[in-house]
Amino acid sequence: MNEQFYERLSHPFRRTKRREKMFRLGSRLLTILVYLAYPIALLVFYLTRRQEFFMAVLVPLVSFCLLSVFRAVYDAPRPYEELRIDPITKKDTKGKSFPSRHVFSAFLIAGVIWSLSKVFGIFYFMIGACIAASRVIGGVHYPKDVLAGGIAGILFWFIGQRLFLTIFLQS
């Protein structure tokens, strides 16, 4: 990604201050929608599949911690640190760009929801893709950051789920 690519990508949302504001609001609302869905999914697990409730808590918790440690060690710069751009999404964070933790979390939570309902899971994976696009358009992540975050979120959930079920819920 270079300055010209970013400008072309973000231009439709920069035409007016109102569009920028709506972009930021939309990005925020998508993130909130995902994070509100997680406790609801936990409640559904608790009420209907209590044996798997701890899996729905522990797999995301451990995954989030592992990803955070990796990001701190790898410490990749953000687009607004390397390129001469004015990001739509305002952020003061330096480094820790790879992989995107917003996208990782969205896809991990979508995996949790997928385990309860394929229809809602697909819906939340689509929201995760929109969050990924908003992080790149907003100028806070490179495409590789969000792609890696999405893939990691999916893999961490499905591998973590299989491990948990194999280790703790063997019949």
Image (cartoon, rainbow, N blue to C red):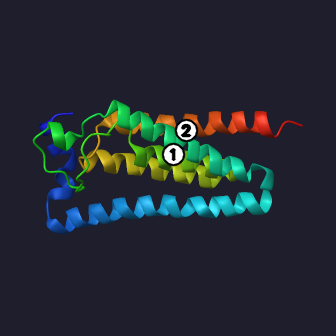
Residue reaching furthest top?
A: 74
Q: Which residue: 41% across, 49% down?
A: 102
Residue 159, position as x, y percentages in the image: 63, 33
Q: Which residue: 79% across, 59% down?
A: 48
Q: Which residue: 48% across, 63% down?
A: 33
Crowding around mark 2 (Cα neighbors within 10 Å: few <14, some 14 to 19, many 20+) is: many
Give the residue number, with chain letter if any, for mark 1: 107
Q: Amino acid at mark 2?
A: Ile
Q: Which residue: 27% across, 40% down?
A: 95
Assess whether mark 2 and mark 1 are in contact (beta carbons under 8 angstroms): yes
Q: Quadrant of residue 141?
A: top left
- Left or right, 124 with respect to 82, comes to right
Q: Quadrant of residue 4?
A: top left
Residue 135, position as x, y percentages in the image: 32, 48
Q: Who comes first in sequence, dot 1 or dot 2?
A: 1
- Above or below, comparing residue 108 to residue 75 in the picture: below
* Front-most of residues 85 and 130: 85
Crowding around mark 1 (Cα neighbors within 10 Å: few <14, some 14 to 19, many 20+) is: many
Q: CA distance from mark 1 to mark 2?
A: 6 Å
Give the residue number, with chain letter if any, for mark 2: 154
* Quadrant into which the N terminus falls: top left
One can see residue 1 in this view? yes
Residue 29, position as x, y percentages in the image: 40, 64
Q: Amino acid at mark 1?
A: Phe
Residue reaching furthest bottom?
A: 18
Mark seen at residue 42: none
**Secondary structure of residue under mark 2:** helix
Residue 157, position as x, y percentages in the image: 60, 40
**Secondary structure of residue under mark 1:** helix
One can see residue 118 in this view? no
